[in-house]
Image (spheres, rainbow, N blue to C red):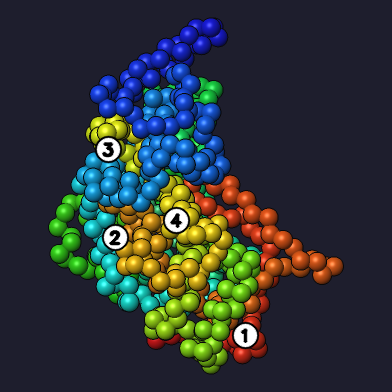
Amino acid sequence: MPSTSVLAASACLLVAFFVWFRKPKASSASLPPGPKPVPILGNVFDLTAKELWLPASEWAKQYGDVVYLHLLGVGLVFLNSPDAAFDLLDKRGSIYSDKPALVMAGELCGCKNMVAFTSYGEQSKRQRKLLHKAFGVSTIPSYHPLLQTETHSFLRRLIVDPAEYIKHIRRYAGGLTLSVVYGYEAVSNDDEFLDLAEECVGLLSNRIASGGGIWPVDIFPSLRHIPLWMPGSGFKKNAMAWKKKMEEFVDRPYEFVKNSIKMGSYKASFCSNLLEDASVQDADSFEFDLKWSANSMYSGSIDTTITTVSHFLLAMMLYPEAQKRAQQELDAVVGSDRLPTIADRSSLPFVECIFMESLRWGVPVPLNLPHRLMEDDIYKGMHIPKGSMVFGNIWAMLRNEKVYPDPHNFRPERYFEPVTREMERKRNPKNYVFGFGRRQCPGMNLVDSSVWLLIASSLATLDISKAVDEHGKVIEPVIEFDNPIFRIPNQFKCDMRPRSPKALSLIKQSEIPVI
Ligand code: HEM
């Protein structure tokens, strides 16, 4: 066995080599400003595992639109204004659209083919083309009946057991994605595909991507060769088990669609439409691209939907006057004899404001997903080194008080305040919450309809308020955010009940399928 001092010396050498190897190239332009790093380790003591967007936004105030830190020589760049984010992630998208190559998540756990992890190149372009076919603006109306069915099922489950609202949102997002993507109808809460999908999404966000998804093997890639018998190889054993599960998650629902088509009994879906579309099938990689893109949609939709809908419920509980105003609008436009549909949308401007404000106030992915810069770049005289991980600080953009006065409060009426056309575009949170450039969320058009309908239907039928304890005392929600990537509020106590006997019977009657 090597002695501890030999091990320590080797570790130091490894760190020194790593830092030297990854050192940014010298450039006449200086790096963007940022908090002072310590030697070798960089800004390791400035980074937090929880709510990193809060210190990041303090740095924005201190250092400006572009802030630079480094971790062991790898640049971390925070873009704190829409201008900086659009200038770089969008306009210079040809070099800002790569993804960090994560050894643990990508290679060892097999996630590198999921769209959000795929490096920028032919494969990511082909996959995004398929996603665009499925979720382009013009395709969304074909999903409307499905959105209605899933929204009504959500309401029915919610009124039976409101305390478990997160479970119902997860079930809603999962069921919706399974039917849109695979034409698969989950019939019960313990459906085999839902269970598999939930297990895998849980693995992805709570295990594989825990701590921001960076593992020691991502920093020292040679650790991937550590033999399984050696102490410290536990991550490899885990990775092997997780990879097997992820592959099952990719293959099984896909096989389901293929078999259903073979049997001649299937529902139209993303997969079946593309499997029947000869024009997209010529590439050798077609089947591979299709099954990984399909799977990526499931993974992309769960935590984001939970975050957005949880914030909507929280806001309705904390801002009852906004809830009342939206309900009055719904009563006047839709009445109490039916549930709202997407066709009502243009007549419900205040409900639209509630939807927009839920996205802004909730900021579901506050630092976006990191993009990797593929070449050295100069921006406004600052040198941004190749290999930097670039974060769009959506949190800072959506808490900018010049654009959103009183930014920490939920104020849907802010979108009614008259402003110039330019400002109207600037203050629309939908321009930021889905990310930027060539990696922008491919599910955004679907969300625009699905979450709107869920919000409108909930407001039309439910009263949402703070819970009271057994002594009749109001329970103030205590909200914390533990997830490093998504701003998911921990489960809070909340009272949700049908607004009236009529609302209750509408929810119950909604079981009758919509044609
Ligand atoms: C409120 C709901 C949602 C929000 C706020 C949201 C937000 C985001 C954000 C910020 C990104 C990163 C964009 C970037 O890197 O610049 C992203 C990526 C992605 N989203 Fe969404 N998303 C939502 C729902 C969905 C849904 C419903 C789906 C699928 C049906 C989906 C699929 C994806 C995929 C596949 C990616 C990776 C794209 C890539 O790297 O090329 N998302 N989303």
Residue at image position (32%, 67%) is 421
Kind of residue at badge 3: Tyr
- Disc on res. 402: 4
Crowding near the residue tagged with mark 4, few <14, some 14–19, many ≥20 C-alpha atoms within 10 Å: few
Q: Answer above or below: position of 76 versus 419.
A: above
**For the residue marked with disc 1, what is the amino acid?**
Leu
Find out if the beta carbon at label 2 lies less than 8 Å from the nearest ligand 1 atom: yes
Number of numbered markers: 4
Answer with mark 4 or mark 1, whichever residue precedes in sequence: 4
- Say which of marks 4 and 1 sits in front: 4
The residues tagged by marks 4 and 1 sit, at their Cα atoms, a distance apart of 43 Å
Q: Which three-letter amino acid code belongs to the residue tagged 4?
A: Lys
Q: Position of residue 28 (x, y in %)?
A: 25, 24
Report the side of 485 relative to 324 (left or right).
Answer: left
Residue bearing the label numbered 2? 131
| For marks 3 and 4 on the same chain, the one whose residue lies earlier in the sequence | 3
Marked residue nearer the N-terminal end (2 or 4): 2
Q: Secondary structure at mark 1?
A: helix
User: Label 2, label 4: how many angstroms apart (C-alpha)?
Assistant: 36 Å
Q: Secondary structure at mark 3?
A: strand
Q: Is residue 437 above or below residue 386?
A: below
Of labels 2 and 1, earlier in sequence is 2
* Residue 182 x %, y %: 36, 66
Q: Amino acid at mark 2?
A: Leu
